[in-house]
């Protein structure tokens, strides 16, 4: 990783976009997994294409992992330490990146937790 000036990086659109993506990609992936999964369940049970649900889960896990990576990357650029109470761009970016790390990790685990019953139980059983 090349050396970057954190203040300069987080004042440009690329750095700002990385912060927001790291914060929002995993919750968005979870909402897509939940909404599309519920919308497809009747069709999946009728057609017998249950593997599509697993592919949906893997795709949303990749999106969530992408958000986790972007949050981690932003945190490393901002300085891998606990956010302080400063009002400068680096402190704000560090807080936002660490929040993204926590949110992304949580929602990645939630997607996995929603997937576990479909792995071990028949979702179409009545």
Image (cartoon, rainbow, N blue to C red):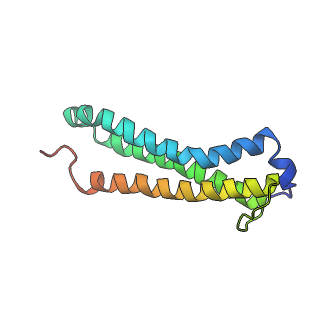
Q: Residue at x 22, y 46 (%)?
A: 123
* Closer-to-camera residue (73/94): 94
Q: Which picture quadrant has residue 85?
A: bottom right
Q: Position of residue 115 (x, y in %)?
A: 35, 52
Q: Residue at x 41, y 42 (%)?
A: 33
Position of 26 compared to 76: left or right?
left
Image quadrant containing the N terminus: bottom right
Q: Is residue 84 above or below residue 17?
A: below
Q: Say how many tags the image has.
A: 0
Q: Position of residue 125 (x, y in %)?
A: 15, 46
Q: Is residue 56 above or below residue 106?
A: above
Q: Which picture quadrant has residue 45?
A: top left
Q: Is residue 11 above or below residue 88?
A: above
Please identify the residue farthest to the left as the structure is shown: 126
* Closer-to-camera residue (59/24): 24
Q: Position of residue 22 (x, y in %)?
A: 63, 49
Q: Residue at x 80, y 48 (%)?
A: 10
Q: Which picture quadrant has residue 14?
A: top right
Image quadrant containing the C terminus: top left
* Closer-to-camera residue (72/45): 72
Position of 26 compared to 38: left or right?
right
């Amino acid at each position: 990783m090349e050396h970057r000036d954190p203040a300069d990086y987080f004042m440009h659109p690329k750095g700002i976009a990385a912060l927001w993506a790291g914060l929002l990609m995993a919750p968005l992936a979870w909402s897509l997994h939940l909404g599309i999964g519920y919308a497809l369940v009747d069709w999946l049970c009728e057609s017998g294409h249950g593997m599509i649900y697993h592919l949906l889960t893997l795709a949303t896990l990749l999106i969530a992992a992408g958000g986790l990576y972007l949050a981690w990357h932003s945190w490393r650029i901002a300085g891998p330490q606990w956010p302080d109470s400063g009002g400068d761009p680096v402190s704000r970016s560090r807080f936002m990146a660490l929040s993204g790390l926590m949110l992304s990790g949580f929602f990645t685990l939630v997607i996995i937790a929603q997937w576990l019953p479909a792995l071990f139980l028949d979702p179409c059983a009545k």
